[in-house]
Amino acid sequence: MAGEPQADCLFCKITAGEVPATVVRETATTIAFRDINPQAPTHVLVIPKAHYPDAGSLAAADPQLVADMLRETAEVAAEDKVDATGYRVVFNTGAGAGQTVFHVHAHVLGGRGLNWPPG
Ligand code: 5GP
Ligand code: ZN
């Protein structure tokens, strides 16, 4: 069923506490934790606790949960004090765009200059 935990999903395991992570924020519906391979001084992943493979499928199934995630990206940026200097929220979608974990996640990147367009 849509949203149900997937046994082979790394981020479902982090949600369940089966894989450790440096959690910076948690709400009833979301978790935010530091990326294990940070690409910027602030590099936090915001995920829904429910499993959806990518942003589009989540948006189609549960628009409120998309809003929950985006609110949390802003809270993370404020807590890491990158909101004033600017930060980027990225949803890699599909292997060709660099998605490697197929549990939707927003990258929050900040604390350094960010080129546009991204590579
Ligand atoms: P994607 O490439 O799918 O957009 O992003 C997946 C992200 O998850 C990558 O930036 C990668 O560094 C991060 N990642 C992969 N495995 C782990 C892990 O076990 N713990 C944490 N905290 N991040 C992970
Ligand atoms: Zn999952």
Image (spheres, rainbow, N blue to C red):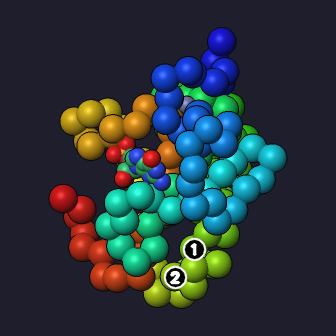
Q: Quadrant of residue 114?
A: bottom left
Type of the residue with mark 1: Ala
Image coordinates for residue 36, horizontal then vertical, percent = 41, 58
Q: Which mark is residue 110?
A: none
Q: Label 1, secondary structure: give it.
A: helix
Left or right placement of residue 61 versus residue 94 in this view: right
- Residue wearing tag 1: 77
Please report the residue visible at 40 percent of the width from the left and 37 percent of the height from the top: 101
Expressed as whole percent of the image width and height from the top left, the position of residue 55 reads 50, 37
Which image quadrant is residue 88 in?
bottom left
| Residue denoted by label 2 | 82
Mark 2 vs ligand 1: CB under 8 Å?
no
Residue at image position (35%, 60%) is: 37
User: How many numbered markers are drawn?
Assistant: 2
User: Against 81, is 93 above or below?
Assistant: above
Q: Position of residue 94 (x, y in %)?
A: 32, 33
* In the displayed structure image, the side of residue 105 where residue 40 appears, left or right: left
Residue contact between numbered discs 2 and 1, judged by CB atoms under 8 Å? yes
